Image: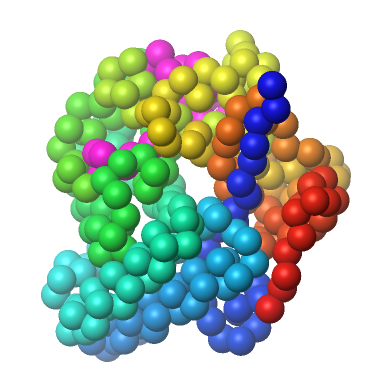
Amino acid sequence: MAGSKRLGYACINLHCSKKGIRTNRKMIQKTFKEHGIEYASKLALANVRDLAEIIKWNHQNGIKVFRFSSAMFPWASEYEIKNLPDYHKIKTIMNGAGHLANRYGQRLTVHPGPFNQLASANERVVQKTIKDLNQHGEMMDLLLQPRTHQAKINIHVGCATGGKEAAAERFCKNFQRLDESVKSRLVVENDDKPSLFTTEELYDLIYNNIKTPITFDYHHNWCNPGNLDEEQALKLASTTWPKGIRQCTHFSSPKRIYEDETAKIVAHADYIYDEIKDYGLDIDVMVEAKAKELSVIRYLKEFETEKNLVLS
């Protein structure tokens, strides 16, 4: 039985960037201390305005999956989004951008940074993680996205301090402290290092406890397969996704194999060189190649020639 794939890309659109359209305007700590929340608000306002433009570009070019940037709100750890001077404008624009995505049938996802560690043994780290994840839940709400795993907030367990079982137990316990806007959307991803979590371990230690779906990362499984081959791991992850919501996956080709033999095993190539195998499943694929939407376009032309993109 043949499956189907919908491909997307993460955060930066290189076509749009050439026109100054981007959602990752940021500042260094010194600038934040000098100019404070007022300047952060101006940058955030510019970022969310451009998010709407990228969503429009995606629609015009047949892209149905997009990961928006976690950097839309610079230094968000230092304030509450609702306290931004431009909050009402930001809310209106984000509502509009989310409405567009919904109208176009475009799936929006987000991947908070690696400093988020719900499994940390350090309570201060956990508190910072909870605040950051809750703000991502707030962003999804502002974008009018459903409180389901359709609008996935993707993280890793983050650490294995005290052993994987102990770390997973802390993760599941701290999961309960999150806002409902996060709990209803949170998914976990398999890791690329043997010291961290395989798909099978996530299934046994996380999913079986809190029913958090697993984002299967093909490249990470290549680096750290555990006991399962690619097809087995992908299909195990597929069983964790709720009925009616497409399984989401991550894909990249190894830079060491195709572009630079001196690269680290975990490094992503600029483009995709392998055909993405769906093994009969219907999946959404977040392409994590460095060339962003260009890698998606090239892949579709090379491997799925019946799909033609009209670039603007």
Q: Residue at x 72, y 37 (%)?
A: 276
Spot occupied by residue 270 in the image (x, y as percentages of width and height): 75, 56
Nearest the eye: 115 or 282: 282
Quarter occupied by the C terminus:
bottom right
Q: Is residue 91 above or below residue 191?
A: below
- Can residue 277 be seen in the rendering of this structure? yes
Quarter occupied by the N terminus:
top right
Q: Residue at x 70, y 56 (%)?
A: 296
Spot occupied by residue 93 in the image (x, y as percentages of width and height): 31, 77
Q: Which residues are magenta?
A: 182-205
Nearest the eye: 23 or 254: 23
Was residue 257 drawn as part of the magenta stretch in this picture? no
Q: Is residue 88 above or below residue 303?
A: below
Spot occupied by residue 259 in the image (x, y as percentages of width and height): 85, 51
Spot occupied by residue 309 in the image (x, y as percentages of width and height): 73, 64
- Can residue 259 be seen in the rendering of this structure? no
Q: Residue at x 15, y 71 (%)?
A: 82
How is colour applied across the structure in the image? rainbow
Res 88 quadrant in image: bottom left
Nearest the eye: 17 or 27: 17
Horizontally, is 120 left or right of 230 in the view? left
Res 144 quadrant in image: bottom left
Horizontally, is 239 left or right of 263 in the view? left
Q: Is residue 18 above or below residue 240?
A: below
Was residue 199 drawn as part of the magenta stretch in this picture? yes
